[in-house]
Structures are given as structure tokens and as C-alpha cells.
Image: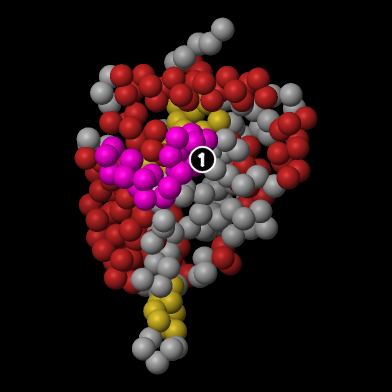
């Protein structure tokens, strides 16, 4: 895998280093705390600390808030509710659907109903050759299929010019053990441009590989990331007060 060298020791991607970004270790701790119920494979010691923190009740309460938010959106006919439901199944904290193709169909349903987030993640799935949409804790490369990579990026680019981010429901925050439900916003170009910086392989007919890099395309996608204006957090416990 051409992106493995960008992963830290805890299995989380660190596509780039920049002064404005947290250090890799801090990112790993924060992500595993916030994504423990959203698909992150937390190291054992982190899971243990969360269990010791006595926040099981808070985590269950946060999960109930996420479910309530999805249901509220769906009841209003908002396709964002269908998107969050699809992403919850993809992340694994909703267990209604587990088959990758069936999960992809949930995203397709949300996209057909008008969810821009679903359209974006479907295009990213095509580009990376992922079995299902929604992997937002790792880099996305072409996986050896450059035709699918280019086709996916061709779909993705105009979408990001309309909406540069995709949303995700998570529980947690920067403090280990904190359990607050929120909407988190991800700049999607962040997962693309390091591929052009670090390069990806073209597999040649004679069995050799050629490492491809493209500084011009790196800049184009990096600029989209840098200019992506998005909220940092939308804390749902302020919307749904639970007794």
C-alpha cells in the first residue's frame, strides 16, 4: 500500500505535517477517543482508559443523541438524515447493515435524495476503490486502478467546488474520555492531495511499477483543502437536552 508510510504506529493516517495541525500522536489520541463509537480501531490502552473513566453511561447517552439527531432529520425529510444513517452503518456503530454493497446502496439512496455529503463520499469511494464509502480516518489512493482513480476524482472535483467537506457523527473531543456527541466536518481534499505529493504507482505491462507524482495537481487539491471554510464542531448535546 502506497499510503502505509503515512500512517503512525496506531494505524491512523497522517497524510501531512503542518504547524497548524496537531502532532501525529495527539491526533491519534483525539481521533480514537472521538471515533471509538465511529469505526476507529482504538489501541487497547485507550479503550481501557475509557472504560476506567466510568463514562459508559455518558457514551450511551451520547449514542442516543446521535440516533435522535438522525431520526429528527429523517422525520423532516432531510436527506442528511439518510446520509448519517448510511455513514453510521459504514462506521459500525449502527449495525442494521453490514454488507459493503448494501451500505453503498444506502449512500446511493441518500445521494439520490439530494445529499451532497453522500455524493462526495461515493465519488471518493470510486477513486480509492474502497469496498464501502465513509473511511475518513485514512488516506485514499488509487489502489492500482488508475482508471477508477481518475474517474472518481473527475466526479469529486466539481462536487468539492460546491461543498468542500463531508460531515460525520462522532462522540468525543480533545480530552480523552470526554463523551459529547457532535457533527464533525472533514475537508475531503485533505485525503487526496498527499497522493500527488508522495506519489502512487502505475503498474506497467512488463511487471514493473512507475511512481507517479504531480506537483501541479497537488497544488490544485491542496488549495481546495486550505480554502475549505467549514465549522469545527456542531455539538448536538446543546440541541437535544437529555434528562
Task: Please rate how many residues cluster around mark 1, counting C-alpha atoms within 10 Å: few if below 14, some from 14 to 19, many from 20.
Answer: some
- For the point 33% across and 32% down, which residue is it? 82
Q: Residue furthest bottom?
A: 206
For the rendered model, the colour scheme is: secondary structure
Task: Name above or below for residue 177 compared with residue 68.
Answer: below
- For the point 36% across and 71% down, which residue is it? 145
* 184 within the magenta span: no
- Residue annotated with mark 1: 92
Of residues 201 and 226, the one drawn nearer to the viewer in this rendering: 201
Q: Quadrant of the C terminus?
A: top right
**Residue 34 located left or right of residue 129:** right
- For the point 38% across and 86% down, which residue is it? 204
**Residue 42 located left or right of residue 76:** right
Task: Name above or below for residue 144 compared with residue 24.
Answer: below
How many numbered marks have been drawn onto this rendered protein structure? Answer: 1
Range of residues picked out in magenta: 88-110
Secondary structure under tag 1 reads loop
* 102 within the magenta span: yes
Residue 49 visible in the picture: yes
Which quadrant would residue 50 be assigned to in this image? top right
- For the point 58% across and 44% down, which residue is it? 40
Q: Main secondary structure of the magenta part?
A: helix
Residue 219 visible in the picture: no
Residue 226 pos. (x, y %)? 40, 50
Residue 97 pos. (x, y %)? 43, 39
**Residue 77 located left or right of residue 177:** left
Residue 60 pos. (x, y %)? 60, 23
Residue 89 pos. (x, y %)? 45, 39
Amino acid at each position: 500500500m502506497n499510503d502505509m508510510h503515512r500512517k503512525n504506529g496506531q494505524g491512523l493516517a497522517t497524510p501531512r505535517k503542518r504547524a497548524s495541525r496537531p502532532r501525529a500522536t495527539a491526533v491519534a489520541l483525539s481521533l480514537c477517543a472521538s471515533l471509538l463509537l465511529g469505526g476507529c480501531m482504538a489501541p487497547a490502552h485507550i479503550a481501557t482508559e475509557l472504560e476506567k473513566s466510568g463514562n459508559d453511561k455518558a457514551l450511551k447517552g451520547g449514542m442516543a443523541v446521535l440516533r435522535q439527531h438522525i431520526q429528527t432529520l429523517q422525520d423532516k425529510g432531510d436527506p442528511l438524515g439518510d446520509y448519517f444513517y448510511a455513514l453510521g452503518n459504514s462506521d459500525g456503530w449502527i449495525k442494521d447493515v453490514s454488507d459493503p454493497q448494501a451500505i453503498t446502496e444506502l449512500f446511493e439512496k441518500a445521494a439520490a435524495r439530494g445529499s451532497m455529503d453522500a455524493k462526495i463520499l461515493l465519488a471518493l469511494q470510486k477513486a480509492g476503490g474502497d469496498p464501502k464509502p465513509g473511511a475518513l480516518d485514512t488516506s485514499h489512493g488509487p489502489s492500482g486502478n488508475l482508471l477508477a482513480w481518475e474517474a472518481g476524482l473527475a466526479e469529486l472535483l466539481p462536487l468539492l467546488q460546491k461543498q468542500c467537506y463531508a460531515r460525520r457523527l462522532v462522540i468525543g473531543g480533545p480530552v480523552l474520555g470526554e463523551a459529547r456527541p457532535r457533527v464533525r466536518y472533514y475537508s475531503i481534499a485533505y485525503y487526496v492531495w498527499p497522493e500527488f505529493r508522495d506519489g502512487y504507482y502505475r503498474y506497467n505491462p512488463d511487471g514493473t511499477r512507475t511512481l507517479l507524482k504531480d506537483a501541479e495537481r497537488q497544488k490544485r487539491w491542496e488549495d481546495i483543502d486550505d480554502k475549505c471554510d467549514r465549522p469545527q464542531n456542531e455539538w448536538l448535546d446543546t440541541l437535544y437536552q437529555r434528562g
